[in-house]
Image: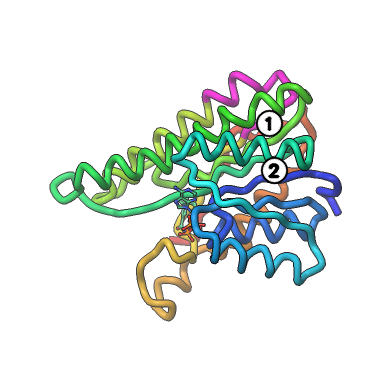
């Protein structure tokens, strides 16, 4: 029970990596707060966790909607008094080249994958600073370090998120707050629009591997800093 008495807010917790991190943190005793846009998917994820005799709560929270983030975070603080862990994970992907990418696709990915991370950090950091403690984990991507052809908007958004994480680390690292960027390689989740039985899924990371890494980071003492870490499958 390494996260007993901890309150963890996970964005994009209704699916894939975020859902798995929520499960893992809950198994370790945290009260996990699942957030995403879709109430039905959130409810299913919350029930899966509670069935395991773990503690979970959920809120609809679109990370591009600052008003909604403010309202949800205020409710959480009123109910639970603090947020110990923030996992910025909510993300979207539409892979296209510069010729094919639309202005809308570009804006949408920047808005969720970069500005959405900023919005949540900006809202929650003051509460962590008050307590002089907290951990922020930003799920970036290998695409935040190196571009592949045909990924222009996604890559730009992830390089942005990488810079954001790095800069926030510098601002709060001596104020009791740990900030870590995780750069996963391809991971088997619904973000990949290929059939469930597509053989490419077999070579991807499992969400469990990312969740184990997130747990390790979440349990580090304040004086031990992992600014960034990459995890990738054999390619
Ligand atoms: N899978 C990979 O290969 C891989 C590799 C590297 C990095 N990543 C990153 O890992 C993160 C999670 O991706 P995943 O693979 O687990 O994908 P996923 O299964 O599609 O999950 C994405 C999650 O984000 C939520 N979401 C999307 N837009 C949102 C918004 N505006 N506000 C709030 N929630 C929103 C979705 O829930 P709702 O639809 O309910 O809102 C869902 O819970 C993303 O940041 C992704 O870029 C993934």
Q: Secondary structure at mark 1?
A: strand
Query: Does 78 appear above or below 60?
Result: above
Residue 46: quarter of image: bottom right
User: Where is the C terminus found, in terms of image quarters?
Assistant: bottom left
| Residue at the image point whose x is 68% and y is 40% from the top | 75
Residue 161: quarter of image: top left
Task: Name the residue carrying label 2.
Answer: 217
Task: Name the residue carrying label 1.
Answer: 178
- Towards the viewer: 226 or 168: 168
Q: Secondary structure at mark 2?
A: helix
Query: Does 39 appear above or below 154?
Result: below
| Residue at the image point whose x is 66% and y is 35% from the top | 74
First in sequence: mark 2 or mark 1?
1
Q: Where does residue 166 sit, x and y in percent of width and height?
A: 53, 28
Query: Farthest residue in the left direction?
Result: 99
Q: Where does residue 181 sit, x and y in percent of width and height?
A: 56, 38
Is the residue at mark 1 in contact range of ligand 1, meaning its CB lies under 8 Å from it?
Answer: no
* 194 to the left or right of 32: left
Please report contact status of discs 2 and 1: CB closer than 8 Å, yes or no. Answer: yes
Can I make out residue 230 in this image? no
| Residue at the image point whose x is 70% and y is 18% from the top | 174
Query: Does 20 appear above or below 225?
Result: below
- Towards the viewer: 80 or 199: 80
Can I make out residue 2 in this image? yes
Instruction: Please state the extent of the stretch shown in magenta in the rendering.
Output: 167-179
């Amino acid at each position: 029970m390494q996260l007993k008495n901890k309150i963890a807010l996970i964005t994009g917790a209704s699916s894939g990596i975020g859902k798995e991190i929520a499960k893992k943190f809950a198994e370790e005793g945290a009260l996990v707060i699942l957030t995403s846009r879709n109430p039905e998917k959130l409810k299913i994820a919350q029930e899966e966790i509670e069935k395991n005799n773990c503690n979970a709560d959920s809120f609809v929270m679109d990370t591009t909607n600052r008003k909604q983030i403010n309202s949800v975070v205020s409710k959480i603080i009123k109910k639970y008094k603090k947020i110990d862990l923030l996992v910025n994970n909510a993300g979207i992907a539409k892979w296209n080249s510069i010729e094919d990418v639309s202005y809308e696709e570009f804006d949408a990915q920047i808005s969720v994958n970069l500005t959405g991370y900023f919005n949540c950090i900006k809202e929650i950091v003051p509460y962590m600073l008050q307590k002089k403690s907290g951990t922020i984990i930003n799920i970036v991507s290998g695409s935040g370090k190196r571009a592949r052809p045909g990924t222009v908007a996604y890559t730009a958004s992830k390089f942005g998120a990488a810079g954001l994480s790095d800069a926030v680390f510098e601002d709060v690292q001596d104020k009791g707050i740990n900030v870590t960027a995780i750069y996963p390689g391809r991971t088997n989740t619904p973000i990949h629009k290929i059939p469930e039985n597509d053989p490419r899924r077999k070579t991807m990371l499992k969400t469990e591997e990312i969740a184990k890494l997130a747990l390790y980071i979440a349990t580090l003492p304040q004086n031990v800093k992992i600014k960034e870490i990459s995890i990738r499958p054999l390619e």
